[in-house]
């Protein structure tokens, strides 16, 4: 689950991570009030207005701007709020900005030049360990750094049974060339960051940039946090941070039915039980000359209710010209799935696209018989190649 920058910073601050202070606002008037309050609390004279959407690259898209007085705070907030912000992570459709973060200016003059770094923590599944990725090239897209100067990215693997050791935090601080007070500040920063990552069951923490200020403080100027959906039952307070306005409406609807759904741009809808089988099914659709319109995993316990919910999701996509249902009956019996398909078809009413149902496993033959004798515009298949051929034939007829 993705959360906003201001929410991520609230979590970080709770664990003792020094952050760029800020206050969220939903109107230009609220932004001005937030700026006044920040000036009172932090002494900042200038303010940074930052669009709050679930995507990176906001600055390049015009979603992060500096205001040097209250008039500019109101003007800039008014420009950003309501805009359709397009970044390299939003796609061409962009995302509407409903909130801005009014943040303190932390790039003030002092005894030394401010310096930006990159730090992220995530799970390295291949090694079964957490890994800290760090770079002296903060403020840049890490993908660009990896492509053009990969030698400037270094990694430190953390055994989750042991945790972050002092020498490992020191090692990264040395790699950044930090000394004196900045060195101590960074070690404290990194330990607090790692504790937050572990305690919240996060999938990723990314701080870009981590800033060494002109007076040698270390703080998070930005914060991206991905939380593990499967662990949210342990964190009711974090689950409440979900912003449904930032998510695809179909994916929100799918989550209510406990379906794993991701909308794609193709013309063949697919419904499968199991993520691996879903990936194979999308490959089959491609090989048959079609394009997958979605990823939809109904899970191992597919029944009439989940099948009907899946149908309704797929049929909301006007680009879908055919539907391929690919079920392996291991836990679930194929005849039950077949009855669920027939029942869902009748409950929904008119379905104007052909449906191919491939059933394999327990009671597969009985499931195919139920489909064939239903009298509905549903085609059964047992082998995957047969299902692919039927998809190809259907698309050819419609061409």
Image (spheres, rainbow, N blue to C red):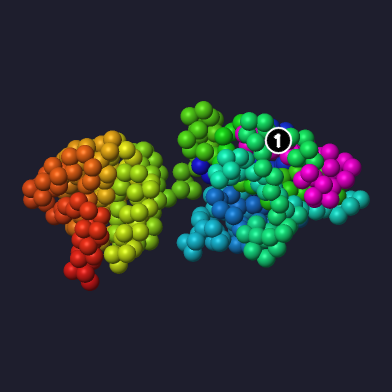
Tell me if residue 252 is in the magenta stretch.
no
- Badge 1 local density, few (<14 within 10 Å), some, or many (20+)? many
Looking at the rendering, which quadrant does residue 83 occupy? bottom right
Tell me the magenta residue range.
Answer: 171-198
Secondary element under disc 1, as helix, strand or loop, is: loop
Left or right relative to 100: residue 399: left
Residue 175, magenta (yes or no): yes
* Label 1 sits on residue: 164
Using the rendered image of the protein, determine whether residue 263 is visible from the camera's viewpoint: yes
Residue found at x 21% / y 58%: 386
Q: Position of residue 184 (x, y in %)?
A: 84, 38
* Residue 263 position (above or below residue 164): below
User: At x 79% / y 44%, what residue is drawn?
Assistant: 171
Q: Main secondary structure of the magenta part?
A: helix
Q: Residue at x 30, y 55 (%)?
A: 269
Q: Position of residue 78 (x, y in %)?
A: 60, 55
Which residue is located at x 16 percent, y 52 percent?
A: 380
Task: Estimate the x, y position of residue 137 in percent, counting from the top left.
Answer: 73, 57
Residue 76 visible in the snapshot: no
Side of 125 relative to 291 (left or right): right
């Amino acid at each position: 689950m993705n959360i906003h920058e201001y929410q991520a910073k609230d979590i970080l601050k709770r664990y003792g991570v020094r952050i760029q202070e800020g206050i969220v606002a939903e109107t230009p008037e609220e932004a001005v009030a937030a700026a006044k309050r920040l000036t009172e609390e932090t002494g900042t004279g200038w303010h940074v207005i930052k669009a709050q959407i679930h995507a990176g690259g906001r600055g390049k898209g015009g979603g992060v701007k500096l205001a040097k007085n209250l008039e500019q705070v109101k003007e800039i907030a008014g420009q950003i709020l309501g805009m359709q912000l397009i970044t390299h992570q939003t796609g061409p459709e962009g995302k509407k900005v409903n909130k801005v973060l009014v943040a303190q200016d932390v790039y003030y003059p002092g005894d030394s030049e401010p310096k930006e770094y990159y730090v992220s923590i995530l799970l390295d599944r291949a090694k079964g360990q957490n890994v800290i990725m760090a770079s002296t090239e903060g403020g840049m897209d890490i993908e660009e750094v990896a492509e053009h100067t990969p030698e400037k990215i270094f990694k430190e693997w953390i055994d989750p049974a042991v945790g972050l050791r002092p020498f490992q935090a020191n090692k990264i601080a040395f790699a950044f060339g930090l000394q004196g007070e900045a060195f101590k500040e960074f070690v404290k920063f990194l330990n607090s960051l790692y504790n937050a990552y572990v305690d919240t069951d996060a999938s990723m923490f990314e701080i870009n940039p981590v800033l060494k200020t002109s007076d040698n403080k270390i703080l998070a100027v930005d914060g991206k946090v991905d939380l593990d959906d499967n662990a949210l039952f342990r964190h009711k307070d974090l689950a409440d941070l979900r912003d449904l306005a930032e998510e695809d409406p179909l994916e929100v609807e799918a989550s209510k039915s406990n379906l794993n759904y991701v909308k794609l741009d193709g013309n063949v809808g697919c419904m499968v039980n199991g993520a691996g089988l879903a990936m194979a099914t999308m490959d089959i659709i491609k090989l048959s000359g079609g394009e997958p319109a979605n990823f939809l995993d109904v899970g191992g316990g597919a029944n009439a209710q989940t099948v009907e919910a899946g149908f309704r999701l797929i049929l909301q996509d006007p680009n879908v010209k055919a539907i391929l249902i690919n079920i392996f009956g291991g836990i679930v019996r194929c005849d039950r799935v077949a009855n669920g398909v027939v029942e869902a078809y009748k409950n929904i009413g008119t379905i104007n696209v052909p449906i191919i149902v491939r059933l394999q496993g327990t009671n597969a033959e009985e499931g195919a018989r139920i489909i064939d004798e239903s009298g509905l515009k549903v085609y059964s298949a047992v082998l995957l190649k047969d299902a692919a051929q039927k998809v190809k034939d259907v698309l050819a007829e419609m061409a």
